[in-house]
Image: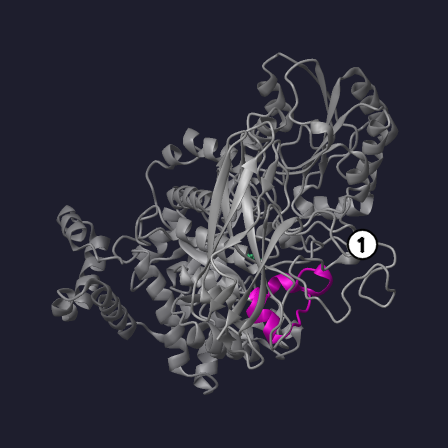
Amino acid sequence: MHEVNFRRYAIELQTGNMLIRIVFLLTLAACLPQAPAAAQEKQPGDDRQMAFFIDSLMSRMTLDEKIGQLNLLTSDMDVTGPSMRKNYAEDIRKGRVGAIFNAYTPEYVKQLQDMAVKQTRLHIPLLFGYDVIHGHKTIFPVPLGMAASWDTAAVEKAARIAAEEASADGINWVYSPMVDIARDPRWGRVMEGAGEDPRLGSLMARAYVKGYQGNDLSASHTVLACVKHFALYGAAEGGRDYNTVDMSRRRMFETYLPPYKAALDAGAGSVMTSFNEVNGIPATGNRWLLKDLLRRQWGFSGLVVTDYTAIPEMISHGVGRNTSEVGTQALQAGVDMDMQGEVYVTQLKSLLQEGKISRQDIDTAVRHVLEAKYRLGLFSDPYRYVHENPDKVIMSPDKLAFAREMARKSMVLLKNAGQLLPLKKSGSIALIGPLADDRRDLIGAWSAAGDWHRAVSLLSGVKAAVEGRAKVYYAKGANLVDDTALLRKLNAAGADITVDAKSPEQLIREAVATAERADVVVMALGESAAMTGEAASRSDIGLTPNQQELLSAVYATGKPVVLVLMNGRPLTLPWEDAHIPAILESWFGGTEAGAAIADVLFGAYNPSGKLTISFPVSVGQIPVYYSHKSTGRPADPGNKYTSKYLDIPNEPLYPFGYGLSYTHFSYGDIVLSTRKLRRGEILRMAVTVTNDGHYDGTETAQLYLRDRVASVTRPVKELKDYRQVFLKQGESKRLTFTLTPEDLKFYNRDMQWVTEPGDFEIFIGGNSRDLQRAAFTLTE
Ligand code: BGC
C-alpha cells in the first residue's frame, strides 16, 4: 500500500515549486488528523490514511468538481503523434475531467497532467488509461495465442513488461485483462481472451493482473488493471459483436463469471462494464450485476468504469428515453466513471437537483475514482508515470527477446504428417502467401501503440535462420482478401490491405512456378489483423476463397507443403487438414513473430502450445466446446435418434488442449491414492509421462474431472489442473496431482456451492480428447 511521500514533498518544498507546495499543504492538512493511526498496523493504517485524505479532499470539492472526476474522455492520438482537441484542454482546466485515455508519451501526458495539477482549483491529478492488451510497444502474441502457452508465469511476465513500457510512456491504467469466456469463434474478440475454459481463463486472468499491478500499485513501473468486459460479453448471440446475450444463471456462475472473479481475487483495481445486456438489463445499468454481485457478494471496492459510450447506448437498448434516464440508471446501478458518454458530466447536476439521484450516489462514485488515484500514488506525485527516459525501457533487447520466447511458446502444431517439420537448413525453400512478407498484420488487432514497422516478417525470420545455407524463394501468390466489399470495410477501418497490380491468376501462376523450383514450400496464410478484434465478426471462418485457391494450386504441384497460419481466431480447416501434411498455428505472433516462427520451423524450438479454444469442423457446429453436457441422448452412430448432425461429426477438428510436438509423449496409467474418498479428503494421483520420440520437448499434461451423477447435470469433463514438464528424449517423469474438496464442488439445484457424494471419473492426457481414465467414489 502506498504511503504519502512527505520527505519528497519536503525536499521539493525547499526547491520552491509553488505547485508542489500547494499539493503538499493540501496533502499534509488531509493527513494530519490520522497521525496516531499511522503507528498502528500497516494495512488498516494505510486505508485509514487514504480515507482521511479523501474525506478531506471531498469536503472541499464542489458538486461540479465531483462530477468532473466521473468523466473519462478520449484524447486524439494520430499517426504523426498526439494532437489535443481544444475543448479537452478547456475541460481539464475547468476540472470537468477525471481521466483521459488514448494519450501517452511522457511529454503529452505531462502537458495534460500539468493542466489538471497546475490549473485546476484542487490540483487533482488525472488517470491516464489505454488499451494495452498484448504489450504496449513490444507486442506479444494476441492473448488467445499467449493462453495457448498454458504458461502463466510467462503471461505474467509479458504483462509486467507491458506495464513497464506503458508506465514509462505516461500510462497508469490499462484496459486489460479481457477475460470474457468465448465459445463462438465468429466473434472477432475471441483473440483478446483466453478461450473457452473457465479454469484456464481464471489462471490467465490472475497472471495478467499480477503482471500489471505487481505487489505495489504505487510503484512507478506498475499500472492499474481493468478487468473487462463485465459481464458475459463473449456470449453474444451468433458471434455478432455487441449482440444480445441471454443465458441461465447456472451457466453464468459455472462458466462465464469465474475469470472476472479470479482477476478481482488477484487484486484487480478496476472493472469495465460490457456493452451487452445481462438478463434483459444492459450491464452498464444493471444493479444486480454491479451492486449485488460485484460489490456485495464479491466485495469489490475498486473503480467501475463503463465501456466506450455504454451509458448513452442504453437509449438504443431501449431502457431509457434520454441521457438523463440512462444516466440515472447507470449511477444507481453502481457505475463510477462514464467513458466518453458525457452523460454524467452533463446530467448529474440537474438529476441531483430534481431529486432523482442522491448526493451519496455521487460521493460513492467520486470516492472510488479518488481512491484509484491515491493507490497509484498520484496524489503524492502526479508525475510518477512520466518517466524521463522511456527509450531505455521501451523495446529493450531483453524485452524483444522475451517477445520471441512468448511467441514460440504460443504456437500450436496442428498437424505434422511424416514428420515434415522441422525443416532442414539446406536445399531450397519457397515461402508463399500474402502473409509471408507481411509485418502490418503480425502484431494483430489491439496492438494500439505497437509499431508494425518494427515487426519481423516471416520472410526475414526465415532468411536470418537459414544463414545462407538454404535458398529462400518468395512469391506473394494471392491478396490477403480479394472480395471488394469486405476489402472496403476492412480498409475503412484502417486495415491498409493492398490489392496487387497483378491479376489473381498471375499471382497464382508465379506462386506455382516458385513452388516448383523449391524442395519444400512454406505457405503463410490466414487473416488480416483487422478481420479480428472489435466489430470484426465473421460468418465464414475459413481461409478466404482466394487464399484457398492459392493453397490448392500449390498443393497440386506435389511439393511438400507446410501451412503456417496467422490469425486471431479458430478457423475451419477441413480441406487443409485432409490434404496439407504440416500445419502450424502461429496466431498473430507480435513484434518478433517472424523470428519465432522460423525458430519453430527449423527446430530451434520444439512447439509446445495447446489450443485453449476448439477449432470447429464447420461453422454449423458452433458453439462447440469440450466441456459440453451429455444430454439425454448422447451421440450414438448406430442410433438415429441421438444428438448429432447428419452431415458432420459432433467433435471439433482440433479439440481444446490439443497441440502436437516434434517428439511424442505417452502416458502411463493413472494411479489414485484411493478409490473411495471421504468427504473433505484430498485425492492424490500420479501418472508417468514418457518422451518416447526423437526430440527434447515440453508437454502440458491436463487433468479433467467428470461428476457422473449429481443433482444437476454436469459436463462430460472439466479441466481441473495441469502440469507442464520438460522431458529429454527417452526421459520419463512421474507427475503428481491433487484434487481438493473445492475441486469437486459445483452449484446444486439451489445454486449452493457444494460437493455431493457419488461416482467421479478422472482423465489425464495431452489434450481433452486423448486421455487416460480412472474412477473413484466420494462417500459421506
Ligand atoms: C472496447 C473496450 C476498450 C474501449 C476503450 C471499447 O470499444 O470495447 O475493450 O477498452 O473501447 O478503447
168 horizontally vs 241: left or right: left
Closer-to-camera residue (307/264): 264
Quick one: quadrant of the N terminus? bottom left
Q: Is residue 233 magenta?
A: yes
Q: Position of residue 187 (x, y in %)?
A: 68, 56
On the image, which quarter does residue 61 sit in? bottom left
Do we see residue 331 in this rendering? no
Judge whether 532 appears above or below 744 on screen.
above
On the image, which quarter does residue 255 sit in? bottom right
474 horizontally vs 226: left or right: right
Q: Is residue 663 magenta?
A: no
Judge whether 158 appears above or below 645 on screen.
above
Q: Position of residue 251 (x, y in %)?
A: 61, 70
Residue type, label 1: Pro
Residue at image location 14% in from the left, 48% down from the top: 11
For the record, the magenta segment spans 232-256
Residue at image location 73% in from the left, 32% down from the top: 417
Residue at image location 77% in from the left, 25% down from the top: 560
Q: Position of residue 376 (x, y in %)?
A: 33, 56
- Mark 1 element type: loop
Q: Which residue is mark 1?
A: 649
Count of residue discs: 1
296 horizontally vs 766: left or right: left
Residue at disc 1, CB closer than 8 Å to ligand 1: no
Ligand 1 sits in which quadrant? bottom right
Neighbor class of circle 1 (other Cα within 10 Å; few <14, some 14-19, many 20+) is some
